[in-house]
Amino acid sequence: DTGVSQDPRHKITKRGQNVTFRCDPISEHNRLYWYRQTLGQGPEFLTYFQNEAQLEKSRLLSDRFSAERPKGSFSTLEIQRTEQGDSAMYLCASSPQAGGNYGYTFGSGTRLTVV
Amino acid sequence: AQSVTQLDSQVPVFEEAPVELRCNYSSSVSVYLFWYVQYPNQGLQLLLKYLSGSTLVKGINGFEAEFNKSQTSFHLRKPSVHISDTAEYFCAVSTGGGNKLTFGTGTQLKVEL
């Protein structure tokens, strides 16, 4: 068990470009969550998957954002036509089932800077 | 909907002194409560959690927290802090199936020599 892995750790992109982040959860965890954390704030929920099904999306997840978990293992988060307001730390977490009973295991995050 | 308030954005404390980080929550239903720690440029690490039962919860690194339903609080305490405890601490709440966490804005604990 190597924990939750996120790639890349840092991404600098120009405004208007598309970016994609990857998250590899703990292998036996069937739930996967994406959060966004801006400077000076706590993480905010974006979306979560149970296996390959995306069960909930936050209003924060605009049409430019899309998340997938095609085989119920790793997940990708894509941001199209990035804006400066997208600059944030994107955190992935996983849990074996309803996280309320277990808490979550978080990855180290992907820090996105849009210039 | 639930919410979390961490009133103290920064807490400076000297090494070996006790510390309390405050957390208040609001929810119309039963909650699960968590404290996470975040070191610079790192993800979040679970310190402790309250699900049910004893209101005093012990976690890692000598931290503990007490759930107070009447005051809707879940304050984090440590009797003697170390320089390595310098980090950001987040209180979080989830409800029902615990499908997502709602976080507070965090408290920066700075331990000084």
Image (spheres, rainbow, N blue to C red):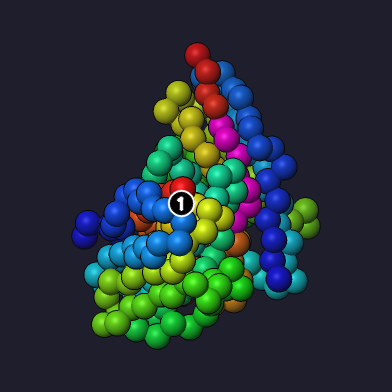
Q: Residue at x 69, y 66 (%)?
A: B2
| Drawn side of residue B33 relative to residue B83, left or right | right
Q: Which residue is farthest top?
A: B113
Q: Which residue is mark 1?
A: A114
Residue A103 placed where, x, y %? 46, 62
Q: Which residue is farthest bottom?
A: A53
Question: Would you say residue B32 is visible in this rendering?
Answer: no
Q: Relative to residue A97, is residue A24 depicted above or below?
A: above
Question: Would you say residue B41 is visible in this rendering?
Answer: yes
Residue B46 placed where, x, y %? 44, 51
Callout 1 secondary element:
strand
Q: Which residue is farthest right?
A: B70
Residue type indicated by callout 1: Val
Q: Relative to residue A66, is residue B18 depicted above or below?
A: above
Q: Residue at x 53, y 76 (%)?
A: A63
| Drawn side of residue B110 relative to residue A110, left or right | right
Looking at the image, how many numbered discs can be counted on the residues? 1
Callout 1 environment at 10 Å: few (<14), some (14 to 19), or many (20+)?
A: some
- Examine the image and state in which quarter residue B103 appears: bottom right
Q: Residue at x 55, y 73 (%)?
A: A62
On what subunit does the disc labeled 1 rest? A
Residue A84 placed where, x, y %? 53, 53
What is the quadrant of the N terminus of chain A in the image?
bottom left
Q: Is residue A46 magenta?
A: no
Magenta segment: B103-109
Residue A38 placed where, x, y %? 55, 50
Q: Relative to residue A65, is residue A84 depicted above or below?
A: above
Please tell me which residue lies in front, B78 or A88: A88
Q: Residue at x 75, y 71 (%)?
A: B28
